[in-house]
Amino acid sequence: MQQLPPEIWFRIFVLACGSLKDFARLSCINRLIRSYCWEPPVSRATYLIERHGKKLAISKAFAQLLIKMPQSADVLSTMFSMGASHSCDKAKETSVHECALIKLVKLPDADMLVPLFYAARPKVNDEHLRACLQNVVQMGNLGLLLALLELPHDSTAEKVVAALLEKSVVADLLKLLELGHTDMAEFQAAGNLKYLLSKETLMEADVIVVPRDLVNQFSPDIVVSAFHKTCMNVAKSIILGWKSIDFSARIHEGEKIICRKEIPPLETLELYDSNHIWSQVNCQDVEVVSRVLNIGVGPTPYAVVVSSGLIAHNQPAVSSFIDLRSWNYLEEFKSTVLNPYAFEILDVFLANGLIIDQRFITTVVATGQKPYIKHILDCWKLQRNYVDRCIIGPNAVNNAFMSRDWDLVELLLNACQEWSAASARNGSNLSDETIIGVVDMDMIETDLAFEGGYEFPTPYPMDVNDFYYFENVPYLIKIGVYSESHFNSALSQMAFIAVDWDLQKFEDTVNKLMSFGAIVTPKALYNATYQEEFFCGASPRFRFLLGKYELDSSPEFVHWDDILTSIHHSYGDVEVLHLLLERGVAVTKQTLLTALNHCVFKPMQPGVEELFKAIKPGDPLLHGLFDDIVENPFFYDLHGDNFYSVFELMWEVGFRTTETAVERAIGANKPNLACLMKRLVEKIEI
């Protein structure tokens, strides 16, 4: 048997058995056949090349599960040395997973076989190569990745990242960390940063062009994952990129994103990005806080407040600032306990550059913890910018007042007096003038960005016997915490929240507020219509306040549109509108135009007829309704058949217009309105 070489016997047995698979079974039975004919790599390599040709031998080897056979790497190496090649034309490959290169990289000796594979000058489809590179990156095999990219073993991370980007491949750092490939994650993160800051990526002096997929690798979620995996270098690389590039100010251009450079680079991350990271780590652990600060995350008021243990991570608006607006919070904070390490953690934050500002002190005061608040006030006095600005503003004093602890309010006011003396504002006195800090508009603008609008908090009395409220609010108005119209706003607020109150309790408290100068405003009337999750209900509260509504001294009622909308959606009670009209609440030009616009949805919906009929003879609106609206760009042309019945009603009520007004409507490109207005010209018979 040994007179013939193994490859000849291999070919004989395969032909005799009928298939490579059947020969494999035979070789398992006969040890002599297995050792002499099956195991030598040259046997299988020679057979495959002679059987399928040099161009198909590689593909057939993988198709016939050769990679699971003994010495498969040696078989492939022998085939390459014998001139075998490979081509994976996309048209011929039904799946990217059938590509020989993708199967090859899964072999144990793949990093040695890839150079041999490339030496055979294969034609690999770009899509297949990208998939192969992505697989190898996620495998964490740097040596194999360098072989696939045909780069030297000492190539820098920046060069590897650049080569991957040329193939439209970006390493998924988050997935690498999840899979435990920390070395590859660290290598790729360092390369991303160096590539990002290299001269080749610059477009102009103050902007930088970044591939779209690369931007996604500078994410706070990846920083958090790296931190939990103790891969500090990964976290630092991402944060250094953040400090140098403003990823939030970006312009999309196809597969590229133009970002603005930070000149000079930031010392720490900005507030929003830092808060995102702090929200996912244990801020109540001194060691954790120190490590997070060391990787470049900024010390933020949010992190400090959460570290105290007094406010949970998910507390609404804690990343901006907390405004207490309801007494309901009192129950919420009863169960909070100060973290025993809170003072130590605060000192760590201060040592790393935390600036105690108005946003911070306002939120901390909301906790009501006087020892902690006092310690923070003492730290504020040691800041270099202490005398520049009083950070205790109206919002902080309001939070102290809402804790129903006047000692806390006095603690803040005394701190204001001490600041006044330190800032050389001697002679100031709280009883004579306001010396609390002015509102920090940067803080308010931040809240506007998160919440979409801002109104200063308005405390309201718990009941008619709320002596804490009625005794202290006048003083807080005097020193500028609340406005002169505070009692009006308090009545409006109470009209909304008192939905579950006993009517007598509500009436007594309203009368008490009015004894302090409050008046029933249109907003109070509208708020009183709230019941069972909807507005526009003729509640007892509404009826009571309507009786207190002063027609002459109150501002214009501006909630007709809200009432009509509620009626249109069938959860509003048209009786509210009737009661307002019976009380004599004025119907203005804007009210009628609003009613007209509501006819877009349905002809003469409930409430519209009543509003037009409320205009009595002699009212200037009967002849002047259309005087200044035809050219108004915010009043659109009227489309649909619903308006005919409305204009017939208007004619009957006594509304009139002129040919001149009709011509102006035509000139303003409002032909439908002009046609309807013709019905109101005196000479036209309806």
Image (spheres, rainbow, N blue to C red):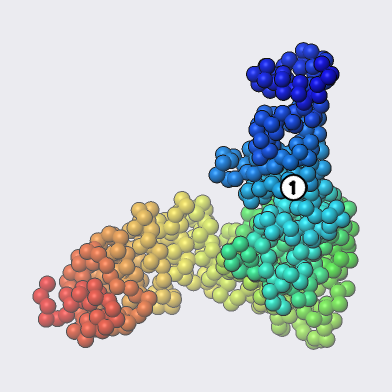
Which quadrant: the C terminus? bottom left
From the viewer's perspective, is residue 622 above or below residue 348? below
Q: Residues within 10 Å of mark 1 (few under 14, many from 20)?
A: some
Q: Nearer the viewer, residue 181 or 355?
A: 181
Residue 656 visible somewhere in the drawing: yes
The furthest residue to the front: 3
Query: In the rendering, at what x and y percent does residue 322 appear?
Result: 68, 62
Query: In the rendering, at what x and y percent does residue 430 appear?
Result: 74, 79
Q: Quadrant of residue 439?
A: bottom right
From the viewer's perspective, is residue 611 above or below residue 433? above
Residue 235 visible somewhere in the drawing: no
Q: Nearer the viewer, residue 541 or 426?
A: 426
Query: In the rendering, at what x and y percent does residue 203 appear?
Result: 68, 74
Q: Quadrant of residue 447?
A: bottom right
Residue at figure coordinates x 36%, y 55% from the top left: 569
Residue at figure coordinates x 77%, y 68% from the top left: 197
Which quadrant: the N terminus? top right
Q: Quadrant of residue 273?
A: bottom right
Q: Nearer the viewer, residue 333 or 17?
A: 17
Query: In the rendering, at what x and y percent does residue 49 appear?
Result: 70, 33
Check disc 1 and give the amino acid type: Tyr
From the viewer's perspective, is residue 428 above or below residue 91? below
What residue does disc 1 label?
118
Q: Nearer the viewer, residue 631 or 57?
A: 57
Q: Secondary structure at mark 1?
A: helix
Is residue 354 left or right of 175 when viewed as pictured? Answer: right
